[in-house]
Image: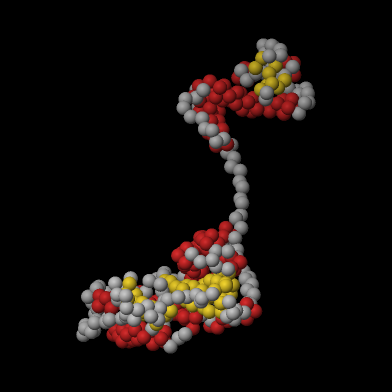
Amino acid sequence: MSLDPSETIKTLGLFWNPRKDSILYTVNLTEPSNRVSKRSIFSQIAKLFDPLGLLGPVIVTAKIFIQSLWKTQLSWDDEVPPNLHKTSLEYRNQLPLLNHIQLNRCISVKNCVELQIHGFGDASEKAYGACLYLRSTDNQGKYHVSLICSKSRVAPMKQITIPKLELCAAFLLANLFTSTCKSLKLKVNKIQLWSDSTIALHWINSPSYTLNTFVANRVSEIQTFTDPHDWRHAPTHENPADLISRGQSPHEFLVNKFWQHGPQWLCQDYDTWPQVQFHQGDDPEKRKDPKIISCKITSSDWNILEKYSSIRTLNRVLAYCLRFIRNAKNKDKISGPLSEAELDASHLSILKLTQSAAFSKEIRSLSQGKNIGSDSKLLSLNPFLDKGILKVGGRLENTKIPENQKHLILLR
């Protein structure tokens, strides 16, 4: 390793000038061939290495172009269409301009008394992205703002609405903010996250369970990583993330100082910051209140007592039905062969069902504490209820009860 402070050092694909303590970029391109294919274009673009996203607007332009190449469904060695060839050639010829860019490696000032992190997110139909800035205040009360990093994504090929893309940008910003804070390990005094989408800000400040699935999942993650109160609205023309969402050519990027230091008001007092109040009306992504519909299904053509000719089979079937109901209501489940207690309970249920069909009036009167009617066939037997079972105290021989109903009466 060279100890000469004037010699530029290359590390992790970046160049560092120790004397100026600045980060440099070096782009070495090969001569273009007469026949331009998707393979050759990708090979040139792959030489751009920007792990911190300091060249975010330039990099996202390449990403958007790559996506447009994929949409043509060309094979690797097919010649690209003339319009894409012209676009790629213009972009390639400007890439050497990046060799003139120098960015300060140190992002805070000496004798710093306060640190703030400001993040910006924005989206367009083509891409969305996020960027972070560190605002440091020296002991004289002056503010200094420097770009920390950025990240970008191209919009999915399946078209989604701009508000949803803005929410994706906010989600990307929340992730970038979390990972960056872990890496910097600085004591930050204030956090402020900015978006120019009032709809996305409204979603972030709403309970996630009230929103539809796509929005709810991202809002839930954003609320986990960040505090919704840290989010504010910034005008589009004062949002540096707008440069990522739309992209810039190397020439445009070289003359633009807005990207490196953010909006001018970041170097001013709090009172000069945007104070936009956003209000949201009807939200199409709000989950509709569920409508609870109850219904009762009855069938007079089916009776479990008439389905089986064997009392033993009926008893076991009903016992399993009662077990199912019991297991559905309790955490401790019953399994295995039927117990004697379950069979007894099933047998009593069969008696109750059959008695309620044959002596419904008598059972209803007795359950209400009234005497049974004078026309009842059970009047002379002193009927009574014992745990819901109809019982009598007389003899059945001299009653007018039909023979097929006498077995329904349990004697005392």
Looking at the image, which residue sits at the far left? 34
Q: Position of residue 184 (x, y in %)?
A: 47, 67
Residue 95 placement (x, y as % from top left) = 33, 84
Q: Nearer the viewer, residue 264 or 397?
A: 264
Residue at point 28%, 78% (across, down): 44
Q: Position of residue 155 (x, y in %)?
A: 42, 72
Q: Position of residue 99 (x, y in %)?
A: 34, 84
- Could you tell whether 282 is left or right of 32 in the image? right
Frontmost residue, 300 versus 120: 120
Q: Is residue 114 above or below residue 221?
A: below
Nearer the observer, 62 or 337:
62
Which part of the image, by quadrant, shows the N terminus? bottom left
Q: In this rendering, would 190 be left or right of 337?
A: right
Which residue is found at the position 40% from the left and 81% from the top?
A: 20
Residue 243, above or below 341? below
**How many numbered discs sit on the rendered protein?**
0
**The quadrant where residue 94 appears:** bottom left
Residue 341 placement: quadrant: top right
> Which residue shows up at 52% across the image and 78% down it?
145
Q: Nearer the viewer, residue 168 or 52?
A: 52
Q: Residue at x 68, y 14 (%)?
A: 412
Say which quarter of the image contains residue 342.
Answer: top right
Q: Residue furthest front?
A: 3
